[in-house]
Image (tube, helix red, strand yellow):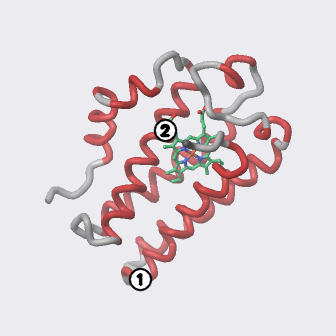
Amino acid sequence: MKPFNVKTACAVLVVSGTVVAHEGASGIVAERMDAMSEFGDVTQYIGDMFKGRQVMDRDTIGNAARLYIKHGDKIPMQFPDTLHSRTSGNTEALDAIWERREAFDASAREFVARSRELLAAYDRGAELDELKAAFYSVARGCRECHDDFRAAQD
Ligand code: HEC
């Protein structure tokens, strides 16, 4: 099994489901949906690694941590308070983002902080147990933000 490659996954996404799922999305809305989709794929893959459904590859975790930080830092800018941002492209963004702006930005910052801890654990060669705990802490960060700020999924 080839180690997960973020670039490949991205390319695959562009030609497969994402385009359909994001039909009608443009500009900043499409940008944030694409970034979140990438998060979704990478996170699912690493979860599968820890469940033994994929071959364990530490570097995939390090690369994911860098991606979480890179995209995570941009989240506050990707939700401007404009009509387009609030309503276009079948967005799942809830009004709570703009009604409780500080809480939303704080959630993004907390997510990035946990991602930095994951990267630090990877960089110092932490054991898998520790990497796993750090990874699931990041994954809880995804869920915490979604619970408050993203429309519930069917
Ligand atoms: C600070 C808040 C926040 C964090 C952290 C966050 N998300 Fe999201 N996510 C959102 C919001 C808001 C949306 C809805 C965006 C829209 O539809 O415009 C979303 C949408 C998504 C989507 C749907 C994308 C699409 O339209 O196809 C996926 C998948 C996703 N997030 C996965 C993740 C994963 C995995 C993580 C963690 C690694 C994560 N998100 C972290 C707020 C967050």
Reading the chain from its start, which is encountered first: label 2 or label 1? 2
**Along the horizontal axis of the image, is 83 left or right of 102?**
left
Quadrant of ligand 1 in image: top right
Disc 1 C-beta below 8 A from ligand 1: no
Seen from the viewer's position, the closer of residues 69 and 24 is 24
Residue 49 found in image quarter: bottom left
Q: Tell me what residue is drawn at x 50 percent, y 41 percent.
A: 36
Query: In the displayed image of the protein, which residue is found farthest to the right?
Result: 99
Is residue 34 depicted above or below 127 in this figure?
above
**Along the horizontal axis of the image, is 16 left or right of 126?**
left
Residue 15 found in image quarter: top left
State the separation of the CA atoms marked 2 and 1.
28 Å
Is residue 17 depicted above or below 154 in this figure?
above
Query: Which quadrant of the rendered structure holds the N terminus?
Result: bottom left
Q: Estimate how packed mark 2 is, as few (under 14), some (14 to 19) or many (20 or more) residues with alpha carbons within 10 Å.
A: some
Indicate which disc residue 129 carries.
1
Query: In the displayed image of the protein, which residue is found farthest to the front?
Result: 154
Three-letter amino acid code of the residue under disc 1? Asp
Measuring from the top left, give residue 64's x and y in whole percent: 41, 56
Q: Which residue is mark 2?
A: 35
Q: Secondary structure at mark 2?
A: helix
Residue 112 found in image quarter: bottom right
Three-letter amino acid code of the residue under disc 2? Ala
**Along the horizontal axis of the image, is 41 left or right of 57?**
right
Query: In the displayed image of the protein, which residue is found farthest to the left?
Result: 1
